[in-house]
Amino acid sequence: MLLAELVATSTSVAATRSRKAKVAALAETLARVEPAELEVVVSYLGGALRQRRTGLGHRGLTDLPTPADEPSLSVLEVHEAFEAMSTLAGPGSQQARRDAVTALFGRATAPEQAWLRAVVTGNVRQGALDAVTQEAVAQVAGVPLTAVRRAAMLAGSTVAAAGAAFAGEEALAEIGLEVGRPIMPMLASSAPDVAAAMAGLSPDGTTEVAIDAKLDGIRIQVHRDGDDVVVVTRSLDDITGRLPEVVEVARSLPAERFVLDGEALALTDDGRPMAFQDTASRTAQDTGVAVTPHFFDLLHVDGRDLLDSPGHERLAALDALVPEQHRVRRLVTSDPGEADAFATETVAAGHEGVVLKDLSAPYAAGRRGSAWVKVKPVHTLDLVVLAVEWGSGRREGWLSNIHLGARDDSTPSGFVMLGKTFKGMTDEMLAWQTERFTELATSPVDRSSYVVHVRPEQVVEIAFDGLQRSTRYPGGVALRFARVIRYRDDKAATEADTIEQVRAHIAT
């Protein structure tokens, strides 16, 4: 299959909001795939390379060769080129990588270059998530969608499930939970407050719900088979060697084989959670900061699979296996008042919020359903747009990613940057801000410059989940999970929040 065919599919998928149309476009392409290409094509249709790391980023793709006039690249040639780049290391590797980029992108047409740049940088915005790709795989392979979804959960990826799907339903059924093979974690949907979450999970007001503290750590999945322990992250990256204290705890538990779901968290001497970045940096290198595992689910224990067991059975087995100091704090209640009080105490203790869980539901690996509902306090700030970047993928041609600033009289400009975001923007908003920021640009706007600097006049209301220390931004802090709520035309830049207000915001 030519890369051009896949790029055309990605473009058509991005151009429609219809789930049915997305599935149809993906299915039409999958129907033409050769067996040797299947895993690569499925990965590319989902907007991801097969390689976790290539050594490439925005900077390495700024100066590309002249595009080819006609498409000639095959999907497998592209995969092989990125595979070769991923192995480059040591002296001369940077130049070798630049040469490889020139060779690959020099054979790509302009649309192919744009798509390759987007997939390398994780900016393929086509709305074809795993769930949609799984529907297309099931449709073309002629197997039940439920079977594909379950296989993807247990195999750890849609790519792995796709290969089995084309071998038939029996091949899909053979994919089960294996201790030592990571599975995709169950995810939570969101609710604005505890009352709304309780109403959804206990509509009659009498059904008991489990309420877990939501820790701001690193999601971990721990597999033990005898003395062998594997620790992986939410994205299934193996970090076993970086967390020996988690391995030690796993080996101390009174079972030989199990799979646990939980969080690794760095704590202060008085037991409060440290900043997320302290925990995150500990998983990247030995910073001297110890982390403690806290588990909230058990998926397998000594030959007994618990995936399909109701939540109350899994929690009973968890409590029997894991001592209290290594379990996430939990309340089981049907009383909304008790639930709200527990959430308030949890946030006051320094945690993110709470997760409310249906005690009758199985563990839906890889799914974000209604059985788990997270509730987190939402912080908002009124900030000023300092610059904006041209979009890529579905946002090509629009001014998209905005640079956010708070007022700071100690700086020459009167503002200090806190971060960037493109989250929360509708198509209508993108069109509006492209026109608005073109008017505010401090120099003529064209595509030769990736970043367009603007006069600091436009106020935007931003929601975010928390602050963290940052050496990247001059204010010394950065916003976590920032997203746009609305533009505030009723406010002048002089009314935006100050850097002092930003720093104090989390403490209130």
Image (spheres, helix red, strand yellow):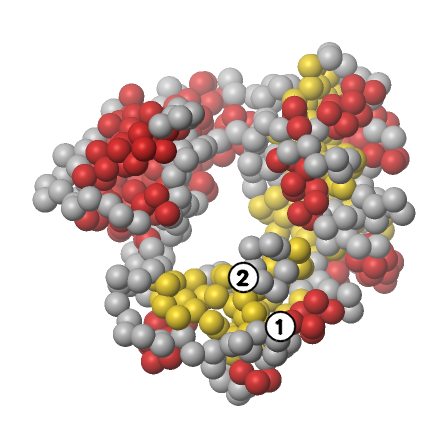
121 displayed left or right of 339: left
Q: Nearer the viewer, residue 335 or 287?
A: 287
Q: Nearer the viewer, residue 436 or 152?
A: 436
- Can you say whether 102 is above or below 428 in the image? above
211 displayed left or right of 278: right
Residue 271 visible to an observer of this rendering: yes
At x 83% / y 26%, what residue is drawn?
321
- Quadrant for the N terminus in the image: top left
Q: Nearer the N terminus, badge 2 or badge 1?
A: 1
In this figure, what is the number of numbered marks? 2
- Within the image, what quadrant is residue 303 found in? top right
Residue 314: x and y, percent? 76, 32
At x 74% / y 69%, what residue is drawn?
504
Dot 1, crowdedness within 10 Å: few (<14), some or many (≥20)? many
- Within the image, what quadrant is residue 425 found in? bottom left
Dot 2, crowdedness within 10 Å: few (<14), some or many (≥20)? some
Say what amino acid the circle numbered 1 marks: Leu
Look at mark 1 in the image and give the residue it sits on.
381
At x 61% / y 52%, what residue is drawn?
189
Question: How far, Cα to Cα, is label 2 from label 1?
Answer: 13 Å
Nearest to viewer (mark 2 / mark 1): 2
At x 44% / y 33%, what residue is drawn?
53
Residue 29: x and y, percent? 26, 37
Look at mark 2 in the image and give the residue it sits on.
419
